[in-house]
Image (tube, rainbow, N blue to C red):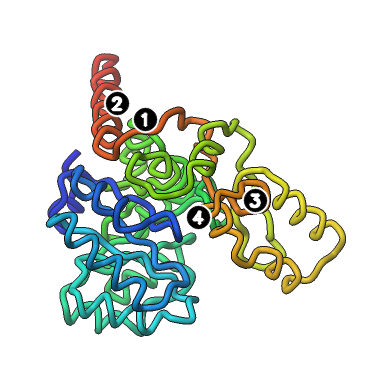
Amino acid sequence: MKTRLCEILNIKYPIFQGGMAWVATAELAAAVSEAGGLGMIGAGNAPGEVVEKEILKAKNMTDKPFGVNIMLLSPFVEEVVDVVCKHNVPVVTTGAGNPGKFMSKFKSVGTKVIPVVPSVALAKRMETLGADAIVVEGTEAGGHVGELTTMALVPQIVDSVNIPVIAAGGIADGRGVLAAVSLGAEGVQIGTRFICSDECTAHGNYKQRVLKAKDRDAIVTARVTGHPVRGLKNKLTREFIKLEKNGATAGEIEELGKGKLRTAVIEGDIENGSIMAGQIAGMVTKIQPCKEIIEEIIAEAEKQLDYINGLR
């Protein structure tokens, strides 16, 4: 399981933890990094001072590399970028925009830049701008999603760029890791499974809803806004669907969604909150330490590879 990413980022396993807003705190990021992966702090819409506290906390919890996921549409993006550079965070992943204007600043402090992309065109553009790798996220993922599936998108982007590709969306175990590698990826990003880790600080109700999820529970709403979201069925998703069917404007739908992720993750209201989770939620069956999750994934991948080799 050694790839270019392991050397570039100085990590043991090419496994990224998704930078989920409200979910990806310092506690989770540090635990994943300690286990040999790359833990991520999700900046979301948090101001710079909040992100800085998480960075300092993570540094006190691990001496391993970790990263910060920056949402480029955040009203605090400028100060978050400054904080990341101030503390020489080893890696940033970026979403919801183009990190080009910040690239030289990141490079000046040695921070590796890994944008999340949903298309071949954007992947090529990010490579031209100097990205060190890219996360290719399929529509199976939780949270904000594109249209193309991981299976279809990853090989097309692998064939289009020379930098390492990290596959994301629909990956929960060693079989998924091996599938991603077979498609040409050099690493994977996993989000939903890490929600159900001991170290994740998300409310217990949120975790239990993921554990109870069935195969068809993760649905997409708010397509009319241009920023569709995948989450688990509940009262809120039914309200979204009703608004969309009645021809509500993008603004009305966005208003309904304001603050709803925090409602679920922090307050534990899993009926009125947004339970962002991917299509693999139905594969998550228990709460485990991050170390156990990662070691189990690697062991599964190796076992599956041995089985494939035995068939030759």
- Choose between 22 and 109: the one closer to the eye: 22
Q: CA distance from mark 3 to mark 4?
A: 22 Å
Which mark is in front, 3 or 1?
3
Q: CA distance from mark 4 to mark 2?
A: 32 Å
Do the residues bearing badges 2 and 1 touch, measured as CB atoms within 8 Å?
yes
* Amino acid type of the residue tagged 2 in the rendering: Glu
Q: Position of residue 305 (x, y in %)?
A: 26, 25
The residue indicated by pointer 2 is 300
Q: Position of residue 183 (x, y in %)?
A: 36, 42
Q: CA distance from mark 3 to mark 1?
A: 25 Å
- Choose between 198 and 135: the one closer to the eye: 198
Q: Earlier in the sequence, mark 3 or mark 1?
A: 1
User: Which quadrant is the N terminus positioned in?
Assistant: top left
Q: Position of residue 206 (x, y in %)?
A: 52, 44
The residue indicated by pointer 1 is 175
The residue indicated by pointer 4 is 266
**181 with respect to 74 (left or right):** left
Q: State the mark number for residue 220.
A: 3
Do the residues bearing badges 3 and 4 touch, measured as CB atoms within 8 Å?
no
45 relative to 4, above or below: below
Q: CA distance from mark 1 to mark 4?
A: 32 Å
Q: CA distance from mark 2 to mark 1?
A: 7 Å
Residue at the top extreme of this rendering: 311
* Amino acid type of the residue tagged 4 in the rendering: Ile
- The residue tagged with tag 1: helix, strand or loop? helix
